[in-house]
Image (cartoon, helix red, strand yellow):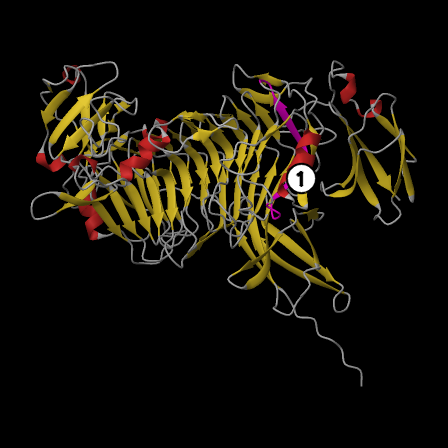
Amino acid sequence: MMCRQVIAQPQLKLYSTINSVGYQVLLPNDYDPDSTALITIHYRTPGNPWLEAFPPSRLVIDSLRQYRGSLFFLNADTKYDVEILLTDSTPIYHAILIDDEITTRKEPDITSTPNIKFVSTNGSGTQYTKAEPGSFKTLLTSGLQCGTTVILLGGTYDIGEMNLVLNTECSEGTPIIIEAAQGEKVIFEGGDTTQYQWIKTQIDPDLYVATIKPELAYNALCMFDSTRLYPYAFLTPNSLTPTYPSLSNLGYDESGFYRRGSTAYIKTKDKKDPNASRIIFSKHFWCLSVDGGNFNNYLYIKGITFRYYNLGKSDFDLFGNPTTSYPSWTLSFTNTNHVVVDSCTFLYTNFPVSFNGGCNNNIVQHCSMIDGTGYWSHGAFKQTRDILYLEPGSYGRYLENAGIFFSPGNGVTISGNIIRNNIIKGIVSGMGLGFGQTYRMEDYDIYGNDISYCYDGIDATSACINTRIWNNRVSYCPVAISLILPTYGPTYIFRNLLDHISERENQNDIFFADCDGSISNKIWGTGLKLNAGGGNQFPGFIYLVNNTFHSSDTLGFNMYLWFSTWKKLYSRNNIFYSEGKSNFFFDGVGNDSLYSFDSKSDNYFNRSSGTLAIIQPVNGINTCDQLTSVVGLDSVLKLRTKSNDISVSGFSFEPNFKSLLKNDFTLSTVSPLIDKGLIIPGINTNFKNSAPDIGAFETDTTTINSAVPSNLQENRGFRLSPNPASKQLKIYLTENIVCQKIAVYDITGKEMISIIHPEGNEIVIDISLMKAGLYVIEVQTNNALFRQKWVKM
């Protein structure tokens, strides 16, 4: 009797958001022991042709062997068929086809329900009608039932320290809605507007002092007209802690205040008198906390302005001295699901929107968040969280916060959250997806946001799986995207504009040491921050596709890259444009054999120095390589890292943006980067002309201006024969071409053949073992790169 070998069956799981689908292919423990199986993914709307998806990453999570990946640019409330094909040859050849279907989530419908309750600033009625509105805080205390709409009539609500407990299961058809009345402005006010008498001090005529209300003691917020003052820990320099800047010398170069109990001091850089200005302190520790009870809450909050929630809080000992401190928050959700925060405004508030514990399928959209903490130096905002027992002025100041923040907690897995179409300006971190590795954050969508003047634009700091970051603009931030403390991945970053990446003045904190040993008091900026230090137990995958990076000053780098903290750094069709020292700084990568940098069809251009990359093999040792060509970067990075996972090829052309002066980073019609990108299945297949453009934006033109330099035209550097070809491909180089590298790529950008420094002007390549299909061949010289498509028969 013949025995038939049974192949273990993998399991497919699908997870939808509004415009994406994440997928997980769980592999049995005995499947594919040598990790040689191949996987392809296709998807479609029923009845339409199949589309190829971007390939997944292979991971091990919690001892489970699996693939994780995503489908992008999907339509809301639409059914999709998904088909997974796994093929393997060990121990026998076999193919496994798995299919399933999923419907993407609907756009949230914030339409008033029949059960409407009206509230107003001074409401006290019990009927909650428009004619006799009630109190919002009283209504929350009594609880809100599914299907209830609370309409806030216009006005300023002097309100705070509110709690809402949701202990029932709601649905899309019976949501709880809290919204401003149509056409009316609703403000939740957390500020104290009392005008105090400010007196000049004898020690400094520009330093003023006042006694504020006892309940406002140790305040973390002081507004001087429209400027947020920095909360100095010291009034005057202290000999025991001389590195801490003080208010009297404005050591952080910021106008500020100092408080000890209910005594407050103010000093500004322009020596203004606070008696002639509007001074506002915060009088509320928080605004609204919602406990969702791990139910499907379907809570929608819309159209409210929150301002000045940042009192801070301290505990005190028997002698009245502060012992611990806690940061304020504004709108906080715990164990909530299907919450939407829509079209709200947050002005100078701490932690404007935060999610804690098990929070799934929540959306923050169309909100505006404005603050002043994001303008401060790295040392300044970091030290607001320090607590010095001998200095009471240092308590209750914690201001290193994020505009939109998720913190699941130990052992918790959350998924399906969406952050989109928000404007965030001047907060330390525009948005933060946790900070730790003891939880899981899966299938997040971050898109359409405009983030500026923060310190970190987007923090997806750790424990993130299937994070999708696209179509965002991050401007004037030292760090555009931070992916430190990585676990697992994959993280997809595509079609983003990351501009004016800049250095920042710094005091009393980390500094930059240059290759010549000189030390700067400025901290470097980077488009992508990966400095977690050392290797990582769970290295992940980063995919950079069609982004535009622009660094605007000396220490602003397109990327400042450390050690092999990530398993794979895959880069395609990006513009790396620098106006400073260098596009890239590779720090501490010497002999790091696990280092990964796979760059294809990227454009590197440095308008100022011409230096594309600096490699410092050992952090702190002043031995560096300064590279001015893409070919040089490829060869020296391989040499320094000793890694087999380094492959760098691309362009070094002036992109010809439409207008740098007007911050318009779209390509002009004469740009040499039009139609020069690789096709990346599932991400950029919807291009305008014959091929994708390089960078974040597609130029809608079918005719390229004849002013494009001749050395950029595909047919001037070499010719092919035959094309199509079956066994051999001959490359005839144009006379006077000094060839650095010839490479053959498939349509996904995978390098199939590489020849370094070929000899002669006629090169023959054996292609007999290659699969039939469409390929691209590139010939790279010192100052140009030529490309041509060809077909393998």
Q: Crowding at label 1, few (<14), some or many (≥20) Cα neighbours within 10 Å?
A: some
Relative vertical location of residue 564 with respect to residue 30 in this rendering, above or below: above
Amino acid of disc 1: Leu
Q: Is 600 inside the magenta-drawn segment? A: yes
Q: Is 700 inside the magenta-drawn segment? A: no
130 sits left or right of 590 in the view:
left
**At which x and y percent is residue 201?**
10, 19
**At which x and y percent is residue 623?**
56, 32
Report if residue 535 is visible in the image: yes
- Residue carrying label 1: 639
Q: Nearer the viewer, residue 665 or 760?
A: 760
Q: Nearer the viewer, residue 160 or 122?
A: 160
Where residue 132 sits, quadrant-wise, is top left
Q: Nearer the viewer, residue 428 or 652?
A: 652
| Numbered range of the magenta stretch | 592-608
Q: Quadrant of the C terminus?
A: top right
Report if residue 106 is visible in the image: no
Relative vertical location of residue 89 with respect to residue 493 in this rendering, above or below: below
Residue at point 71% right, 40% down?
A: 749
**At which x and y percent is residue 433?**
42, 45
Q: Which residue is outermost to the left?
A: 319
Residue at point 34% right, 41% down?
A: 353
Where residue 283 sits, quadrant-wise, is top left
Q: Nearer the viewer, residue 67 or 606?
A: 606
Q: Dominant secondary structure of the magenta stretch? A: strand
